[in-house]
Image (spheres, rainbow, N blue to C red):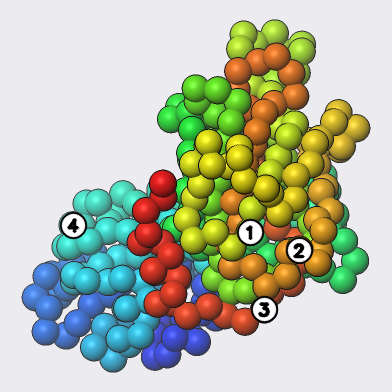
Amino acid sequence: MSKTVSILSPSQLTGLLQSSKLVVADFYADWCAPCKQVAPVFEQLSAALSRPNLVTFVKIDTDQQKEVAQAYRVTSLPTFIIFRNGKVADKVQGADPMKLQSVVKKLSEEVQNMGSGDGEASGSGSGSGGSNWRGAGLPRGYTDITSQIELRYCELLNVDPDAGGVRVLFDTAKPSALSGGKSATKDWVESDTDEQLLLFMPFQAMLKLHTLQITSLPPSDDDDEEDAPLRPRTIKLFTNKPHNLGFDEAEDLSATQEFELSEEDWNDEGTANIPLRFVKFQNITSLVLFVVNGDGDGEKTRVDRLRLIGETGEKREMGKLEKIGDEPGE
């Protein structure tokens, strides 16, 4: 019996994206010949890799679920979209069985390895392993709303290409630097030509931000690493910008909030828990984070994870969100 789930409504897909860590979606149509050619491969992957609440394979008829297809910009068939923790992790367009197998198996192995540590996860997030790691506890009455970031429209400027990309900042896994041992790939972000970083984050809904949690785990003095990156010191936040700022613009503009971090602000998990001026962070649709400089004499800064704490509000219309994403980032 097939383990593949047929999606009959947008809400059904939303529920699966919330309950399953990895969702592999096949966008197809009954009249599409290439869709039929690759369908047996998809079913084989589904039979071999499906795991309850961990890895779920779904089929979406684009003629019946036009709203879903439009939301994820499906313009050619077949299109396979792989969601990890509710966010788009990869996309395969066309009947390419080899690429589909490679992408799905790689992500499935990562997610299943991650899932094996779920029993260690802690509600406080501090010092926990597992797939929902957080470097500091939650303020009373508020929740982690990092999942509301529209990851596909995020933009990170001045990032070292040898380090991780923007996605690692919102990874729900514990940073490798806290796991004792070195990761095969860098699961953190470093600046490139100087200390500064500029990160643009649009949201899926209107948010009320209460706290920013930023984790930075540069090598210790004992590691004696040449040109080791620094922790951020001065940070500026800008709200409701339609796109990213330029560095000169961010330097000159008055920030919604600006703060300086000192050594005392970082806890044992390498996380600074930063309360925001709540009245200034009501009903915001985007956030620009500008790392102005690092805490030391080096030339690079490092950020391992970011978490947004607060409340979610009204959902944004997809059309407006796409318009923001299509605007120039300069």
Dividing the picture into quadrants, the one containing residue 124 is bottom right
The spot of residue 308 in percent (x, y) is: 70, 58
User: Looking at the image, is mark 4 or mark 2 nearer the viewer?
Assistant: 2
| Label 2 – label 1 distance at C-alpha | 9 Å
Considering only vertical position in the picture, is 184 above or below 276? above
Res. 96 mark = 4
Secondary structure state at the residue bearing disc 3 = strand
| Label 3 – label 1 distance at C-alpha | 16 Å
Quarter holding the N terminus is: bottom left
Say whether disc 3 or disc 2 marks the residue closer to the N-terminus: 2
Say whether disc 3 or disc 1 marks the residue closer to the N-terminus: 1
Give the residue pinned by disc 2: 280
Badge 4: residue crowd in 10 Å (few <14, some 14–19, many ≥20) = some
Q: Are marks 2 and 1 in contact (CB under 8 Å)?
A: yes
The foreground one among 313 and 121 is 313
| Label 3 – label 2 distance at C-alpha | 15 Å
Q: Residue at x 69, y 26 (%)?
A: 294
Badge 3: residue crowd in 10 Å (few <14, some 14–19, many ≥20) = few
Q: Are marks 4 and 2 in contact (CB under 8 Å)?
A: no
Q: Residue at x 19, y 82 (%)?
A: 29
The spot of residue 311 in percent (x, y) is: 74, 72
Res. 152 mark = none
Give the residue pinned by disc 3: 313
Type of amino acid under label 3: Gly
Secondary structure state at the residue bearing disc 1 = strand
Give the residue pinned by disc 1: 239
